[in-house]
Amino acid sequence: MSVQTAERQQAEVRDEKKERAEKVDYKMVTFSLAGKEYGIDIMNVKEIANAGRFTYVPNAAPFVRGVYNLRGDIISIIDLRVMFHLPAERKNDDAMESLLILRVDDHVFGVIVDNIDKVVGVSRAGIQPPHPIFGDINVKYIKGIIENQGKLFIILNVEKLFAVKSDDEQPEAAPVARAPLGAAVMAPQAVIDERTLAPVAGAAAAADVNAEFVRETLFAFKRFGVSAVNEAWFLTRYAEWKASRSEADVQLREVAEADEFLGPFYSPSTGALWSTEYADAVLAALPPLQSRSINVWNPGCGKGYETYSIACLLRRAYPEARIKIWANDSDLLAISMAPNMVFSPESVPEQYMDMMVKGRNGLTFNQSIRDSIFFEFHDVMNSNPVPPVDCILCRDTVSFLSTTDQNKLLADFGEKSKHGGAVILGTNERLPLDGWNRTSGELVSVYVREA
Amino acid sequence: MRVEYINPFVESAFNVMREVLQCDVKRGELYLKSTSMPVMGVAAIVGLAGDVEGRVLFDMDKPTALKIASTMNGEDLASLDDLAKATITELANMITAQAVTKLHELGFRFDLTPPAIFTGENMEVSNQDVEALIVPMETPQGKVEINVAVRERA
């Protein structure tokens, strides 16, 4: 009896599934971007076309390829691959691109995709909500996922993507094309554990009042904020410091003593071009970067030595890529010399030589290296207008902020970094964020964000 | 703000002011600011476009504006009338234009919008998301703050 019931139930479930699969009430045009399958609601697709020779529009956002005359209507052409930071095959000017002509509200425009496949009919009930940790595309722009004939299709939410006026969440977002760019920046924020970052009066430290004083004086003299970023180093260094001095002499009385205390903190090759050993260690720890354009953010670049070092490192590792580095510092004196830095031949490690040119006063980096760097006088505590980056280089900078400011900057790291992106911190710094994995040994401190 | 942009603005502000006022001008310490800030009473604004986007704001209080306009015109102006306003606008234009010319020589392409002038009390200017470089200038006529907010186009 019970067996019968079970069988009947199973049959019912089967029927239900079948019925659901058969009832086609949602049609989408499918296409591919960087090898993955996507779909767009057919109600938004006006037509498909092959076209090329778009008219370039100066000063447009990077993902706007230009405008196109579609039988008398001028429409703008958006490259979805650039918009989503996916690798795009660069065709010559005459080549045809696959275009989907979309209509959202009253606006008509074309989007470039890799290949347009076909129209697929599915059942609306089978669409599943997107998972919040989708890699390439911000989950906000995904309507859902559907399976059809063994393939998974990501259905894009065209209304959100090309919203003319974005709603509530983004007051600063501007018209059509700009809105998604701003939004792409709003990657899901990494959560910072407030407790771990707050000035720690932890068990180990509380035992020693002197340690508390040292923490405070370090901040007062050098603006060095002890927090989860550098706690481990601080405790080791404090023990060492204490052992080397008499009981009455543990505290830091003047700036020079604070300098002495912090002496071993600084990363190798501070204030100089990176040594071969250090540069190799950094490169080994960095994840392989896929995209053709590599964006790097270098807050606290100081005089610019590390900026040039990483520029050369990336140029050598990725000769074909378009490298852009946003380097900023709030010390005007330090950074104002950076764009035109001159080196004397004997101070430059061998591996940089082929990227330098001889000038009147000494060696300078060649134009291609210099063009890849933007040196900016900028305070990271103000809003950071960098686009999503593949790599953040921030050595011995976070530690020299108050703990509140450290939290803010680390939150910005989470916001600005692409998935799979890397953060390079000072050798003695740790990244106290969830969702990042350390990939390096002791010499460098590199963390990679989970994709 | 890109380091390369800073000097042209500071230099041209200094040169133009010294030239038109025919007197000693002192430059204060440069600093950055991103929150909204009060406007002293008279503000001339010039927009920038091209490789960058942003604006330059020349901020001073009313007596200073009057004195500067009087000096530039070589006569005593009693109130901030059309002539005085046009004079301040022109000063803003000269400084920005000279800075932009210098930047052009360095290979940066900027376009200018025609200047506009705002007067009134208790005004505030805020630029969300853009930090401004403040160049304070001390003249015998009073303090003028040049507020440059430009950023690279994304």
Image (spheres, rainbow, N blue to C red):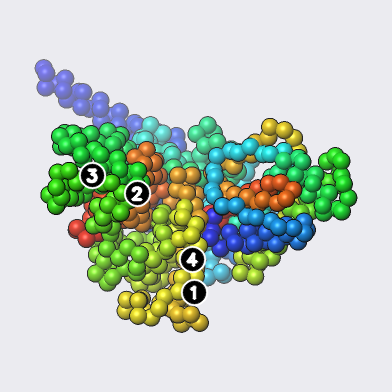
Closer to the chain start, of discs 4 and 2, is 2
Q: Are marks 4 and 2 on the same chain?
A: yes
Q: CA distance from mark 4 to mark 1?
A: 16 Å
**Which residue is depicted at the point 83% across and 46% down?**
B84
| Few, some or many residues within 10 Å of mark 3 (<14, 14–19, 20+) | some
**Which residue is depicted at the point 72% across and 41% down?**
B61
Subunit ID for the residue under disc 3: A
Q: CA distance from mark 2 to mark 3?
A: 14 Å
Q: Secondary structure at mark 1?
A: helix
Q: CA distance from mark 2 to mark 1?
A: 36 Å
Circle 3 residue: A251
Three-letter amino acid code at the position of disc 2:
Lys
Where residue A305 appears, x then y in whole percent?
A: 39, 66
Front tag of 2 and 1: 2
Subunit ID for the residue under disc 2: A
Where residue A411 appears, x then y in whole percent?
A: 37, 42
Q: Secondary structure at mark 3?
A: loop
User: Who is closer to the viewer here, A394 or A249?
Assistant: A249
Q: CA distance from mark 4 to mark 2?
A: 23 Å
| Few, some or many residues within 10 Å of mark 4 (<14, 14–19, 20+) | some
Circle 4 residue: A337
Label 4 with label 2: CB-CB less than 8 Å: no
